Amino acid sequence: MFAISLGEGAELRPIEPWQAQEFLEHVERAREYAQAWVPFTATVKDVESARKHLQTFADRQAADTGRFYGIWLDGTLVGGVLFRIFDTSVDGCEIGVWLEPSAAGRGLVNKASKVLIDWAVDERGMHRVEWLVSSRNERSKAAAERLGFTRDGVLRESFPWQGIRHDMEVWSVLAPEWRALRDAGDARDAGDAR
């Protein structure tokens, strides 16, 4: 198994079905903070449902249609990033993110998302990366904007969740835009190091 350092004691690595207990414990810590936006925080309620959720993504990874990664901070699972959709037939994917409250405000979603987007664009040739978010989820919209995504539009009342029909905003970044953003960031970082 691999682990990618995100700095300051944080790592990005796959979450696999054998880690169901650890994932369940994380979901229980994240539930109140993320349940308004992250469906699995409502559906994962015991080890079996945690294992089933993780197996779904293991199957998607085997089929090359999705992936699921965790963010560990000082050895504790505190959040993650995923490709909810990964479609090589159209060179497009959708990234999703979540955290528990103890990990908020540390830039972990930003760092982990960059790793996934770099891989999708550079290694897999994805042209379009999407970020779908409820219009009510200000934190997630701000994260998409910080990453350089552009708000494409709104799918009105397209997602029924917890008794509310949410408007879903579609944000995206295209491969050439992503490379330009990354190159500009690398240039800024090099200037800061002088």
Image (cartoon, rainbow, N blue to C red):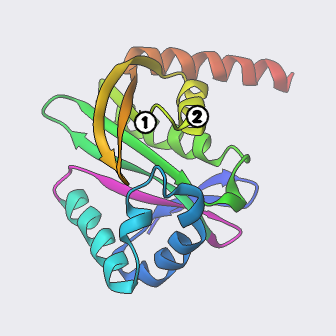
Q: In which quarter of the image is the C terminus?
A: top right
The residue furthest left is: 89
Instruction: Mark 1: give few (<14), some (14-19) or many (20+) Cα within 10 Å.
Output: many
- The percent position of residue 58, horizontal first and vertical second, equals 27, 66
**Badge number at residue 173:** none
Identify the residue at image location x=16%, y=28%: 90
The disc labelled 1 sits on which kind of residue? Answer: Val
- The percent position of residue 170, horizontal first and vertical second, equals 37, 26
Left or right, residue 11 beside residue 118: right
Identify the residue at image location x=58%, y=63%: 32
The magenta span reads 63-76
Identify the residue at image location x=79%, y=18%: 191
Q: Is residue 84 visible?
A: yes
Left or right, residue 3 beside residue 8: left
Q: Can residue 124 be seen in this view?
A: no
Image quadrant assignment for residue 45: bottom left
Tell me the residue that label 2 is attached to. Answer: 138
- The percent position of residue 41, horizontal first and vertical second, equals 44, 64
Task: Give the CA separation, mark 2 to mark 1.
Answer: 9 Å
Classify mark 1: helix, strand or loop: strand
The disc labelled 2 sits on which kind of residue? Answer: Glu
Which of the two discs, 2 and 1, labels the residue nearer the N terminus?
A: 1
The residue furthest front is: 163
Left or right, residue 191 beside residue 110: right
Tell me the residue that label 1 is attached to. Answer: 133
Q: Quadrant of the N terminus?
A: bottom left
